[in-house]
Amino acid sequence: MTILVTGGAGFIGSNFVLDWLAENDEPVVNVDKLTYAGNLENLATLKDDNRHLFVKADIGDYDVMLDLLKQHAIRAVVNFAAESHVDRSIHGPEDFIQTNIVASFRLLEAVRCYWNSLEAQEQQNFRFLHVSTDEVYGSLDKTDPPFLETHQYQPNSPYSASKAASDHLVRAYHHTYGLPVLTTNCSNNYGPYHFPEKLIPLCIQNALLGKDLPIYGDGQQIRDWLYVKDHCSAIRRVLAAGQLGEVYNVGGWNEKANLDVVNTLCSILDELNPRSDGKSYVEQITYVTDRPGHDRRYAIDASKLERELGWKPAETFETGIRKTVQWYLDHQSWVNNVLSGEYQTWLDKNYAGRSA
Ligand code: NAD
Ligand code: TYD
């Protein structure tokens, strides 16, 4: 048996592939287009591992995807591939529409064709697991209860709108064609191999480089943080035991305001890697112009996943964030390789116009 993972050179996908092969011997075909966010260095430890086959391809390439599904007799697809950064979706939504909607649709078509060709028993055993986000539910007020799976879809950014569209397509393929799908909607992840355009790795790296730690608006926006390895274990659990057609929210009950997250990063860095002038990294915090349409609060109610499938996160925010800071301190060469020309162009585009 073999599974096919898409977007497995990105942040969560590469953690998933590494954890999957550490947990069991079932081979993985890993399909990734290698956009700016895809990095084969994340998978360097699998270089000589014949359980892992990397294929550089676009999930929107119907023929390639269908060939791979047939050739490797795939029994499950885990779909991580996406454009994932809200700020990039604001500057340029086109790629988000193309990958998150159009290419996801083409992937579903290839999977549907493949699934239709399977024997009845194989059809029953097949799974298409779509990895999505809590951002499709929109923004919560301070006192609202956390998102349940039944929460109305109210996406507010081009990113979340494009993810919402793919969630709807996945749902429709189950309802209309009987495709055996599962969907997970997870809160903000953090951990190893996180691309340093996102808040946590960006602030760790900027702190170490003596640069500003940019806080959008008042920094009181709330995100619900989950250590990436816990997201991976949740996906494994849903793949193994999830009910077909069901949606599972994934989260760790870790709501934090952005400013508190950055203050925590600063105090861990003050302890593990003190500034040479003896001052705190907090001195580098800078308030910058807010993100347009910035969602105020996300919070996930993950009780369905816990109640029905017995999943619980292993890390608290305190243990996970400490491991993450330590990982970045230990993997500065990984970060430096990521900080390429394209990344510098992005920093100019996103931060140059934001007055401090
Ligand atoms: P990422 O941007 O780090 O990685 C995405 C990967 O997909 C990259 O390796 C990229 O090269 C690849 N890719 C992009 N377009 C592709 C295409 N057309 N064909 C093949 N590969 C393509 O993203 P991530 O943070 O690892 O997120 C993975 C998934 O999890 C996404 O679907 C995202 O919406 C979802 N998610 C992310 C978070 C989070 O906090 N990062 C939270 C919940 C859900
Ligand atoms: P991000 O990591 O981009 O994830 P998302 O937008 O998907 O939640 O941002 C997390 C939060 O941090 C979000 O509220 C925006 C904020 N933020 C900043 O305040 N400064 C920054 O430089 C970045 C990248 C994000």
Image (cartoon, grey):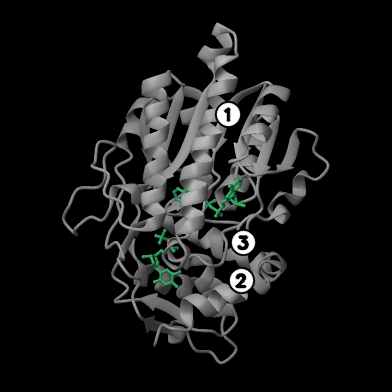
In the image, is residue 153 above or below residue 320?
above
Q: Secondary structure at mark 2?
A: helix
Considering only vertical position in the picture, is 4 above or below 32? above
Rendered residue at 45%/59% (across/down): 93
Q: Amino acid at mark 1?
A: Ala
Quadrant of res 323: bottom right
Q: How far apart, in angstroms, are the residues tagged by discs 3 and 2?
A: 21 Å
**Position of 286 relative to 228 (above/below):** below
Task: Name the residue beneath numbered marker 3.
Answer: 327
Question: Label 2: which residue?
Answer: 343
Identified at 38% across, 47% down, the residue is 252
Residue bearing the label numbered 1: 110
Q: Quadrant of the N terminus?
A: top right
Left or right: residue 143 versus residue 335 is left
Task: Give 251 or 56, whichever is nearer the viewer.
Answer: 56
Secondary structure of residue under mark 1: helix
Element type at marker 3? helix
Q: Nearer the viewer, residue 187 or 165?
A: 165
Tag 2: residue type?
A: Tyr
Residue 2: image location, x then y, percent: 67, 25
Question: From where the camera sits, is residue 33 visible?
Answer: yes
Residue 236 makes an appearance in the image: no
- Does 344 sit left or right of 83 as displayed? right
N-term-proximal mark, 3 vs 2: 3
Labels 1 and 3: the sequence-earlier one: 1
